[in-house]
Image (cartoon, rainbow, N blue to C red):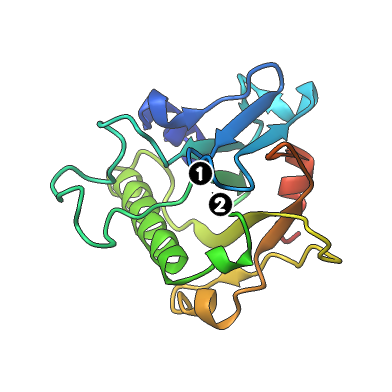
Amino acid sequence: MSNLISCLRQNINHHAVKRFDSKKIEFIEPDKSAKLRKLIIKASKPELLDQHPKDGIFIELDHSNPLLENFTHFLKSGASGINQKVDFCLITQKDNTVYFVISDLKSSTQGNNDRCAGQYKNTKLFINYITEIFESFELTQAGLIKKFFKLLFIPNEGIATSLPISPCTEDSIDILKNEPECNFHLVNLEDGVGEISLNELLSRLPS
């Protein structure tokens, strides 16, 4: 029996796993009108293991690949709201606690709307489904403490500070509507490209 991160690395479709190449990974927004069109995450060599964060994995969720564009092919692609998803999820484990950082590239804080809430909810349901399968088949340990976060990357356009990430509990999906400012990470742009470090991203998690 392995820990959850090892289990994910072994069993998730490799086309959906985002690996570091030359100590960086890139997430691209296909909408050419978007202000934030690419997010680059950089890491130092000691932070990585086999092109992954040492204790984590990046799963890319927004795909044009027809085999990966929907969470499930048992539902029609046009099913209203059901197939909404975010750009990526960083999953990292520390002892018996697993952090799920559900992340999306946005052009402004206005992107934090009902659609965003649906993206988060669908992604969280999908991740729970995957992890519960692993647990039920005893591929990974049961009883993990799971902490979910929504983190939106937005252009830094004169906003004074980056606001702290906040946890979202099992019964607080509405936090996305009630506290739309709690989970933003501001990035400086150059020609539509933003850049952060892996360490900077991990620092958003609670100690």
Q: Earlier in the sequence, mark 2 or mark 1?
A: 1
Give percent across and percent down for residue 59.
48, 38
Amino acid bearing label 2:
Ser
Q: Are marks 2 and 1 in contact (CB under 8 Å)?
A: yes
Residue drawn 70% across the image and 16% down it? 22
Residue 142 horizontal side relative to residue 22, left or right: left
Front in this rendered view, residue 133 or 189:
189
Give percent across and percent down for residue 165.
69, 64
- Where disc 1 sits, the SS reads strand
Q: Quadrant of the N terminus?
A: top left
Q: Is residue 3 visible?
A: no
Residue 74 horizontal side relative to residue 15, left or right: left
Q: For mark 2, what is the residue?
A: 103
Front in this rendered view, residue 176 or 108:
108
Residue 177 horizontal side relative to residue 35, left or right: left
In this view, the residue farthest toward the front is 33
The total of numbered circles placed on residues is 2
How far is mark 2 from mark 1, CA to CA?
Answer: 5 Å
Give percent across and percent down for residue 114.
43, 72
In the displayed structure, 93 sits above or below 147; it is above
- Where disc 2 sits, the SS reads strand
Q: For mark 1, what is the residue?
A: 88
Residue drawn 60% across the image and 74% down it? 180
Front in this rendered view, residue 128 or 25:
25
Residue drawn 39% across the image and 64% down it? 121
Mark 2, Cα crowd under 10 Å, few <14 / some 14-19 / many 20+, is many
Q: Is residue 34 visible?
A: yes
Residue 74 horizontal side relative to residue 98, left or right: left
Amino acid bearing label 1:
Phe
